[in-house]
Every structure is written in structure tokens, then in C-alpha cells.
Image: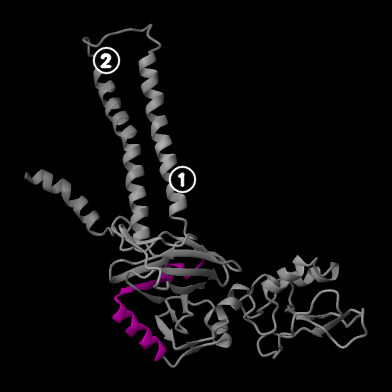
Amino acid sequence: MSRLKLLLLLPLAVVLSGCNFVVMAPAGDVAAQQRDLIVVSTVLMLLIVLPVMALTVWFAWRYRHNNDAAKYDPDWDHSTGLELVIWSAPLLIIICLGAITWMGTHLLDPYRSLDRIAANRPIDRDKAPLEVNVVALDWKWLFIYPEYGIASLNEMAAPVDRPINFRITSSSVMNSFYVPALAGMIYAMPGMETKLHAVINHAGNYRGLSANYSGAGFSGMHFAFHGLDDAGFDQWIARAKASPDKLGRPEYLQLERPSSNEKPRAFGAVDGDLFRAILNMCVDTGKMCMSEMMAIDARGGSGMAGLNNTLPLAYDKYARRGTALGPQPSFVAGICTPEEPQGRVTAQVRESTPLLGAGLKRPSLAPLGSSTSFLFGSTSKSQS
């Protein structure tokens, strides 16, 4: 090879040496099927793109100004055969792409349970999937393993060839959960639950990240994903359980405060109701959950007087936790049945109190139509 060719190929080699082709060489079956879709779609489009590019060069050379041998026909304006080729070929490509996209959209739906571990390897129905609850925090990832009663920060593990069921949410703003070697990205949104079903087929250490910009600490919002054999996974779980750190509601409220570049760590015990509280935006003791508010709305709502109570459902994770508008914290504490004469509804108002350390207890939900009391922080006076 000549020195000129070496000089020309050297920059290309330098560029490619820094590339990571994990998307095109994934370790999970779902990501592998998505890779195949990319390859097939690209090849189908190249069936049109390459001939068009080649013909463009050929026409420019064939009908150049100084080529007297080329036929000159200024009155030519139509060819049925050429029109059929020009329109039928792209139409067939579009039909093929549409069919492949439609099938892939349904077969690789992230909400659809897996029916295979890998090609020609059906799923073992006797082996329960691994349940993992994912919470996108600012700017870190929290993973809760409800089956094992543990949690981990900025690190997760899964056994090889065991299906994984992810339940994903966010504490504040929208993020995107993405492990390129495992499966496609799926959004994490506050107050909402998204799902992802995937499987890892090869042991190794992989990178997970947020694929949706979420503020100043976004560049450090990544985590380690470990694909382990069964023995290695059991050891990883045992190390996590041995951690003295516990993750209850008070610890979570401190953990969710914005911070970046957090080192991975484990929690040996987790509040079993924590993920539900995070999803319903009611980790704060005494704050009404979104599910409770939706139950009220499903029964007809709480009337005009209750409209202002829906405002505090907007999440505020800073010092004035639980407030949405105004300088004073305001929050719906709950709905209970006080000792009042039948048919009388009383609105009891408490003075505005910061949620942390308020010591409020969640009252039991009462059926509508009974004597009901709405408890919420405010600066108004009691009224009935």
C-alpha cells in the first residue's frame, strides 16, 4: 500500500477506534431485533439510494457538454417504461418498509411480555421474571428490587437469560431510561408509570444512561448495568443485603434532592410501599396521593371548594416541598370522617406547616356522601 493511501486511511482509523458499536452488536435479544430492523430498513432504502446516486454520476458524465456522441433529443418528454420504474420501485420499497415497521412496532412493543429469550429459544414459563422498579432522580438512577427487598443507586444487575420487567417513573422531570446493549429507550415521567420488558443474553458490564436532557447534572446521569450468571447475581444480591443503609421515606426525601455524579451504593432494606408512593407523588407523610385524588374525581369530584386542592399535586422537591403556587406551602392531607351530625360537611383548615417534621398522619379515605372533612395546609381561617 502506498504512503498516500496510508495517510488517507489514518484519520478514518483514528475516528473508528473511538467508536462504540454497542447498538449494532448488543447483548440482549430485544436490542438485537431492533438492530436487525435498522439493518433491513437501511438495506431496503439503499436499493433506491445507491442506483440514484450512480445514475446521477452516469448522467452527468454521459451528457456533459463536450460529449458529441451523446444523443440530443430536445423534444423528448415522456417514457411509459421509465415512469413505471421511477414510481413502482419506490412504492414497493415503501410498502415493504411499512410492513416491517408495523410488525416490528407490535412485536417489540416495550409493554408486551417477552415470548422468547433469544432466537429459537422460547421463554421458560416456570421461571419468574425479575421485577425492577426504576426511578429517575436528579441526577441519578434508583433501582428497587421488590422481590429481594433491596435497592441500588446508579448500579443494577440482572441474571443472564432471565426476563426483566421494568416499571419506570421519575421524581420530577421527564427522563429517558436507556441501556443500549439491552433494549430501546423508554421515557420516565413523574406521576406516570412506563414499562419495559427485556433480557440480557451475554454476561458483561454495560452502560446505562438518560437519553433526555434534564438539567445541569445530565452529563453525569449514567449507571452501570451488570449481566451476571445466576451465581454472580446471587452474590450481588447478598452484598446489597449486607449494606447497613436503609431506604425508607425520610431517606428517600433526602436522596431525591438534586445531586450529580453520585457513586454507586446499595440499600440493604427498602420500604415496601416506597415505589407506589413515588409514583403517586405522596412520599411526604400526610400528602394526598394522586390515586386518591383520581378516585375522588371518578366519583364526581369534590366540588368547587376542592379545585384549589388539586394544585399541590404539582411536585416541588426543593425546600418548600409540597407547594405548587404561592409563598406558603399548601397540600392536601387527606379525607376522613369526623364526628359531626349526619349530613353536615365541615371544611377544617390547618395553618400552613412545612411538610417535613409536621408529623401528619394520613386519615382513612371515606366514601363520598358521608360527613367528610378536607384537611389541607392553608392560611385561611376555619369555616363550616
Residue 102 disc label: 1
Quadrant, the N terminus: top left
Residue 175 visible (yes or no) = no
Residue 12 vertical placement versus 328 (above, below): above
At label 1, counting other C-alpha atoms closer than 10 Å, the crowd grade (few under 14, some 14-19, many 20 or more) is few
Tally the marks.
Answer: 2
Label 2 or label 1, whichever lies nearer to me, is: 1
Residue 81 vertical placement versus 334 (above, below): above
Task: Estimate the x, y position of residue 98 in percent, counting from the top left.
Answer: 44, 40
* Location of residue 345 (image quadrant): bottom right
Q: What residue lies at 43% left-to-right and 35% top-to-bottom?
A: 95
Mark 1: which amino acid? Trp
Q: Secondary structure at mark 1?
A: helix
What separation in Å lies between label 2 and label 1 (alpha carbons)?
48 Å
* Location of residue 307 (image quadrant): bottom right
* Location of residue 383 (image quadrant): bottom right
The furthest residue to the left: 1
The furthest residue to the bottom: 244
Residue that carries the numbered disc 2 in the rendered image? 65
Q: What residue lies at 42% left-to-right and 67% top-to-bottom?
A: 219
Task: Estimate the x, y position of residue 245 in percent, counting from the top left.
Answer: 46, 90
Quadrant, the C terminus: bottom right
Q: Is residue 208 left or right of residue 339?
A: left
Mark 2: which amino acid? His
Assess whether residue 206 is covered by the magenta stretch.
no
Where are the magenta residues, as a range? Answer: 214-242
Residue 47 disc label: none
Task: Estimate the x, y position of residue 73 in percent, counting from the top left.
Answer: 33, 7
At label 2, counting other C-alpha atoms closer than 10 Å, the crowd grade (few under 14, some 14-19, many 20 or more) is few
Q: What residue lies at 47% left-to-right and 85% top-to-bottom?
A: 149
Mark 2 vs 1, N-terminal side: 2
